[in-house]
Every structure is written in structure tokens, then in C-alpha cells.
Image: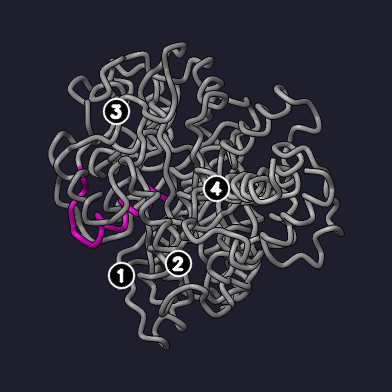
């Protein structure tokens, strides 16, 4: 009964196939697919000493930032100046995705097109909020600039993308902490699957390396205290002690299979299923039942059995509680197949990019399916016996070109799971 | 201060403000009296930031309706001079 809403609504309608025709990334590993993939397979992390803020007064002094100058250089192509880090990252990723999908021809300003924008974020316009707080405390209520409202509003990212690229479908944000991007992609997938849209630009973005937001995260026991940036983020390792934050954005162009074929678009992969649930148990502690429910719903919708899954791209935050809980959830769903299905976790490379993580890690998943190779896991010298999974080691491994699972779980108890398929 | 050096100072202040306000990359070397609002990429929203910054930096309060008919940096400068800048 508890699962009936999603199953009934999905099975009672004719489902359209939803394919990926464009992907774009802005991350600590780079802003183009080939560089990102090379860094992943070579085992090079994007975590380093933080540049954006003076960390003298902070417990944590490391994070995963986009290499210096790359975002600014890309924005110049669009004749844009940096506005807010999260929006800037989203614009860079979306520009690549739309260009790859062959939806932007010539130079800006482009003609209007009926494409919706559904994006996710955890912290939204963090940089603009910080600017506004600063102005308020320095100059009082008249100290804040008039554009503080549109810069800080929670839909600033989707609105900014819609304006920049002249996309006239709907635009809105999904805000569900670390599940945001996966929820946004799942929502976009459903819109197309059920005939409410033909093409959706979706994904997630977060850019919160400013003194206030980074300070807030410093004061909760979720971040690693290991000072060495190369070793700090250790998903599923026995000696893990927390995650490392990262900035980034991942963007996808999803469209109906019919439209992609009609316009002879290059298909990069397919969304086969999506499941979501809420723990309703605790704001920050995950639950096996909630996570397992989302995984089962996604598998069911994709009509895929656990043993058919080629690999799992785990949420894998490297916190004590997430990785242990996610391991139990995977075993609860996969049973004996758990011992066969390879598991990867990308946060030791990108850092935890919060509301962008599901999109960045879905890009990695589709690249892995294209290449038939799963990238390695970093810092897994000491596997945690409580995380009894078939974890990929320090070298890439071959995988079958079959559906993959991408998990995302967030503070607030939201769980989102995608089943991603190779281009077919 | 002579009228021309007063104008020059205001145009310099406006350049600083516009560089801060603009969301677009542009060639600022050509900034001067003949630069239009359109050239600056300001719209009805971002022009509010411009007015706000003028009040903060130059100390002259302009209402949105004051600049409705203004089309160039030179005309803004003249308006500010007329208001006592």
C-alpha cells in the first residue's frame, strides 16, 4: 500500500522513452568530459586547499573547487560576468549540455525554444546571501541592493538558465539537500515520460565556498578532519571520518526518444526508472527502509532485476552513518546479488557537491556505461567490514553495458534513485 | 572644482558603479558621455542597482522616474550635476 502511488500512476499510462542527448559538467576535476574522465580513471582527486576563502579560523581547510579561471573563461564566451557562484557553475554546465545536444546554433542571443528547466540545489544562491548578510550587518536595512531579492530567490538558478538560453518551457527548482539533482532529473524524466514535455534541461548546482555557508558546515560533525586533501574523503573505508565539500554543477538535456530520433540527435544514454521516498524518521540520520524503498521503486519502474544491474554509483558520502546505512540498504534490496554488483563512490574525487552531486555522479555513470569501465574508488585501503559490498578498488574495472543504479540521499530524509541505461 | 572636472569625476564614479553593476562582459575603455544605457546592458531591474549605487557612492538620490527618459551616461551626469553633485 505504501508504494502504491508511484507504481499505479506509472503503470496506468503509456510511458515514453526518455533519452539523454547532452551532458555538461563544471567540477573540481574539470569542465569537460574528457578531462574529468581522465582524472577519474587516473585516480586524481579534485580536493585541495581552499582558495575561495581564508580558512585560518576554520576547522576544515580543504574542499573541491573548480580549477582556477575555468568558469570565468567559459562565462566570457557568453559575455557574462560572474553573478553568483552556483548560477555561474550551472550556466557553464548547461551551456555544454545544450551545445552537445545541438540545441544552440550560432552565438547568443539564441532564438526561444520550448525547453523546460528543472534544476536542483542544496544551498542555492549562497554567495548572494552572504553579500546581503554583509550589507545588512554593515549598513542596516537600507544597505542591501535592490537586486538582492532576485539574486537570492531560490529559483534564481533555473530562472537564470531560462533567461540565458531563452528556454520557454517551465522553470523551477527542486530543493531537497543532497538529493536535489537526482530529484530534479527524476522529475524531468517523468515530465517527458508522461507527455508533459518533449525536452528538459535538468541537473543540479551548488557553489557555497563563502565564509558564512562554509562556516555553518564546519560546525556540524559531518566533515572530515583529516588535513591531507588527498586522503580526507574515504567512502566506505573503516577509517573514514566525514565528507569533504565540493562545488559543482551537472546538466543534462533529456528528451523523448521520438524527438531525439526525429532530429537525428546523438543519444548518450537513457533514464530507465526513478524511485523516491522519504524516511520520516530523523532530519539527518538515514534509514535503511527509506533508502531501500526508493531503490526498489526505481528497479520496479525500470523493470530491471537487481542481478541485472551493471554497477551501483553509491551516494557514498564517507560519513560513518551514511556509508554503513547505504551498505545495509543495498544488501536489503540486492540480496545475494550484492556480492556481484560493483559499487563506486565519486565523492572522493568531486567532494560532496550537495545538491549537484546526483547530476555529477550520473554523468560519471553514463560515461562509465559508454566506455564499459567503472572508475576506481580512492582511499579504500581499509574496507569497513560493516560496508560489506563489492567495492571497486584503486583501479578501474570493466563493467557490462547494462542498467546502472545511481543513489542520492539527503538531509531531511529524502531519497532519490535513478536507473540509467546505455544508449541503445 | 570646474564643471568639466566635476563631470569627469562623476563619469569616473559612474564607470566604477557600472563595472560593479553590469552582469555582462564589455569593453570599458570606451565608457564615456556617449555610452548608452542599452550599451551597458542594464534593464529595468539592474538599473535599480545603478540608482542605489549612485546614492551610496555619490550621495544623490534619484527616483526610477528621474531616469525614464535618460539614454546616455552624459545625460545621467547632467542630471546628477543638476541635483547638486
Taking the view exactly as shown, the residue that stands out farthest to the bottom is A262
Residue located beneath label 4 in the image: A83
Residue B69 percent coordinates (x, y): 81, 67
Same chain assignment for discs 2 and 1: yes
> Who comes first in sequence, dot 2 or dot 1?
2
Q: Chain of mark 3?
A: A
Residue A211 percent coordinates (x, y): 52, 24
Q: Nearer the viewer, mark 4 or mark 2?
A: 4
* CA–CA distance in space, label 4 to label 3: 24 Å
Q: Chain of mark 4?
A: A
Same chain assignment for discs 2 and 3: yes
- Dominant secondary structure, magenta: helix
Residue A374 is one of the magenta-drawn residues: yes
Q: Chain of mark 1?
A: A
Which mark is drawn over residue A423? 1
* CA–CA distance in space, label 2 to label 3: 31 Å
* CA–CA distance in space, label 4 to label 1: 36 Å
Could you say which is closer to the camera, residue A26 or residue A74?
A: A74
> Who comes first in sequence, dot 3 or dot 1?
3
> Who comes first in sequence, dot 4 or dot 3?
3
Residue located beneath label 3 in the image: A48
> Are the residues flagged by discs 3 and 1 in contact, CB closer than 8 Å?
no
> Who comes first in sequence, dot 2 or dot 3?
3
Whether residue A305 can be seen here:
no
Q: Label 1, secondary structure: give it.
A: loop
Q: Label 3, secondary structure: give it.
A: strand
Q: Nearer the viewer, mark 2 or mark 3?
A: 3
In the rendered view, does A291 fall on the left or right side of B65? left
Query: Magenta segment range?
Result: A359-375
Amino acid at each position: 500500500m505504501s508504494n502504491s502511488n508511484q507504481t499505479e500512476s506509472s503503470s496506468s499510462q503509456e510511458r515514453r522513452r526518455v533519452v539523454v542527448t547532452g551532458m555538461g559538467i563544471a567540477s573540481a576535476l574539470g569542465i569537460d568530459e574528457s578531462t574529468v574522465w581522465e582524472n577519474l580513471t587516473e585516480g586524481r582527486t579534485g580536493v585541495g586547499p581552499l582558495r575561495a576563502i581564508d580558512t585560518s579560523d576554520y576547522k576544515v581547510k580543504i574542499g573541491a573547487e573548480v580549477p582556477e579561471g575555468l568558469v570565468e573563461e567559459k562565462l566570457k564566451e557568453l559575455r557574462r560576468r560572474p553573478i553568483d557562484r552556483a548560477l555561474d557553475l550551472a550556466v557553464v554546465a548547461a551551456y555544454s549540455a545544450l551545445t552537445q545536444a545541438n540545441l544552440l546554433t550560432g552565438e547568443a542571443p539564441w532564438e526561444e525554444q520550448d525547453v523546460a528547466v528543472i534544476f536542483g540545489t542544496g544551498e542555492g544562491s549562497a554567495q548572494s546571501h552572504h553579500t546581503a548578510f554583509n550589507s545588512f550587518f554593515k549598513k542596516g536595512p537600507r544597505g542591501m541592493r535592490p537586486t538582492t531579492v532576485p539574486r537570492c530567490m531560490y529559483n534564481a538558478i533555473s530562472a537564470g538558465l531560462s533567461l540565458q538560453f531563452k528556454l520557454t518551457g517551465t522553470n523551477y527548482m527542486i530543493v531537497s539537500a543532497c538529493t536535489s539533482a537526482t530529484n530534479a532529473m527524476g522529475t524531468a524524466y517523468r515530465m517527458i515520460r508522461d507527455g508533459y514535455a518533449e525536452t528538459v534541461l535538468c541537473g543540479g548546482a551548488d557553489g557555497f565556498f563563502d565564509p558564512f555557508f562554509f562556516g555553518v558546515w564546519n560546525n556540524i560533525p559531518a566533515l572530515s578532519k583529516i588535513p591531507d586533501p588527498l586522503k580526507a574523503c574515504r567512502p566506505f573505508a573503516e577509517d573514514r571520518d566525514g565528507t569533504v565539500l565540493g562545488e559543482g554543477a551537472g546538466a543534462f538535456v533529456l528528451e523523448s526518444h521520438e524527438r531525439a530520433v526525429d532530429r537525428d540527435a546523438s543519444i548518450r544514454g537513457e533514464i530507465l526508472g526513478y524511485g523516491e521516498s522519504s524516511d520520516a524518521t530523523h532530519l539527518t540520520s538515514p534509514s535503511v527502509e527509506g533508502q531501500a524503498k526508493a531503490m526498489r521503486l526505481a528497479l520496479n519502474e525500470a523493470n530491471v532485476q537487481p542481478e541485472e544491474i551493471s554497477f551501483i554509483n553509491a551516494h557514498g558520502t564517507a560519513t560513518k552513518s551514511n556509508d554503513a546505512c547505504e551498505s545495509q540498504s543495498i544488501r536489503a534490496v540486492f540480496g545475494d546479488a550484492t556480492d556481484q554488483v560493483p559499487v563506486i563512490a565519486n565523492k572522493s574525487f568531486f567532494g560532496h557537491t550537495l545538491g549537484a552531486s546526483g547530476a555529477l555522479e550520473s554523468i560519471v555513470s553514463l560515461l562509465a556505461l559508454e566506455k564499459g569501465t567503472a572508475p576506481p574508488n580512492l582511499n579504500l585501503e581499509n574496507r569497513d567490514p560493516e560496508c560489506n559490498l563489492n567495492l571497486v578498488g584503486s583501479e578501474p574495472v570493466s563493467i557490462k553495458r547494462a542498467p546502472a543504479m545511481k543513489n542520492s540521499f539527503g538531509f531531511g530524509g529524502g531519497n532519490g534513485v535513478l536507473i540509467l541505461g546505455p544508449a541503445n | 572644482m570646474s564643471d568639466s572636472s566635476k563631470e569627469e569625476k562623476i563619469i569616473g564614479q559612474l564607470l566604477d558603479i557600472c563595472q560593479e553593476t553590469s552582469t555582462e562582459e564589455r569593453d570599458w575603455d570606451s565608457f564615456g558621455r556617449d555610452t548608452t544605457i542599452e550599451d551597458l546592458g542594464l534593464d529595468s531591474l539592474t538599473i535599480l542597482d545603478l540608482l542605489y549605487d549612485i546614492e551610496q557612492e555619490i550621495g544623490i538620490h534619484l527616483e526610477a522616474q528621474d531616469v525614464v527618459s535618460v539614454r546616455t551616461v552624459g545625460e545621467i551626469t547632467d542630471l546628477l550635476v543638476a541635483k547638486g553633485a
